[in-house]
Image: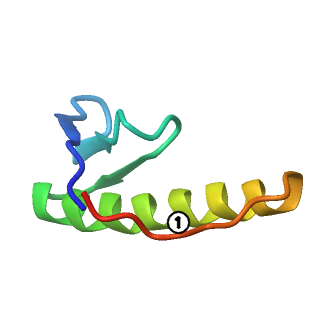
Amino acid sequence: MKFQVVVREDPEDGGYNVKCPAIPGCHSQGETVEEAHDNIKDAIVACVEVHNEDLLRTQSSQVVEVTL
């Protein structure tokens, strides 16, 4: 699965901030662009896992994988 992310240089603290607009609240940072990319991948996985767990707890739902 592919996600578009937005990477911005942080002029105040240095390094880079990165967010995934498709997943509200999913953001990370890194000292380099490469580190920011690696960190947002971990953040995306964590956000999706939490979202799936929340759905299972609050609804009578089933989680299945769908390939686009």
Residue 52, x across and y down, in percent:
64, 61
Query: Could you tell me residue 66's position as x and y percent?
Result: 38, 64
Closer to us: 41 or 68: 68
Q: Position of residue 2 (x, y in %)?
A: 20, 56
Q: Nearer the viewer, residue 43 or 9?
A: 43
State the image quarter where residue 8 is shown: top left
> Is 59 placed above or below 66 here?
above
Asked if residue 66 is positioned above or below residue 23 in the image, the reply reads below
- Secondary structure category for the residue under label 1: helix
Placement of 65 over or under 16, stated as above or below: below
Which residue is identified by label 1?
46
Query: Image quadrant for the C terminus?
Result: bottom left
Front one among 23 and 61: 61
Report the side of 52 relative to 14 (left or right).
right
Residue displayed at 44% across by 60% down: 43
Instruction: Give the crowd class for mark 1: few <14, some 14-19, many >=20 residues within 10 Å.
Output: few
Under mark 1, the amino acid is Ala
**Residue at the (52%, 65%) spot, across then down:** 46
Q: Quadrant of the N terminus?
A: bottom left
The image shows residue 22, relative to residue 15, as above or below, that is: above
Res. 67 image quadrant: bottom left
